[in-house]
Image: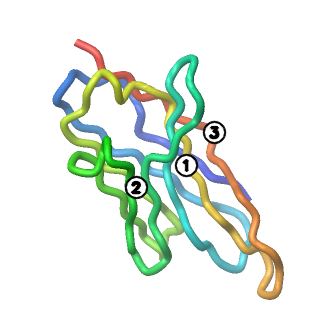
Amino acid sequence: VQLQASGGGLVQPGGSLRLSCAASGTFFSINVMGWYRQAPGKQRDLVATIAPDGTPTSTDSVKDRFTISRDNARNTVYLQMNSLKPEDTAVYYCHAEIQRRRLGLEYDYWGQGTLVTVSS
């Protein structure tokens, strides 16, 4: 099982980016999916999560600017980021709780990280 993230890049303050993360491989189901970020010299922090039924959560600092969504048919989670600020600069990691077998346990999987830089 692998998570492949994409969509990062350099954007000016006030701009937008859309991150994508697709799960591939053999598995039974995906539970919660989400995005985390890690700024230079700081710990990895939660940005947003989304349940299989589409119920989202997000941290207060991005609540009115970022939108998380998922396409269960494509095993993909998205993060639409609007009104970006320099403090949003970080490596963004996708995460998924994946059950590999019908009666098996869930395991945490991480994408490789995609760099988002907000700068003029």
Q: Quadrant of the N terminus?
A: bottom right
Closer to the chain start, of discs 1 and 2, is: 2
* Kind of residue at disc 1: Cys
**Label 3 – label 1 distance at C-alpha:** 8 Å
Q: Which residue extends farthest bottom?
A: 103
**Label 1 – label 2 distance at C-alpha:** 9 Å
Query: Which numbered disc covers residue 94?
Result: 1
Q: Is residue 14 left or right of residue 84?
A: left
Q: Secondary structure at mark 1?
A: strand
Residue corresponding to mark 2: 78
Q: Secondary structure at mark 3?
A: loop
x and y, in percent, of residue 18 in the image:
33, 45
At 61% from the left and 60% from the top, the residue drawn is 96
Depth order, front residue of 60/51: 60
Classify residue 106 by image quadrant.
bottom right
Closer to the chain start, of discs 2 and 3, is: 2
Question: How many residues crowd mark 1 within 10 Å: few (<14), some (14–19), many (20+)?
Answer: many
x and y, in percent, of residue 29 in the image:
65, 78
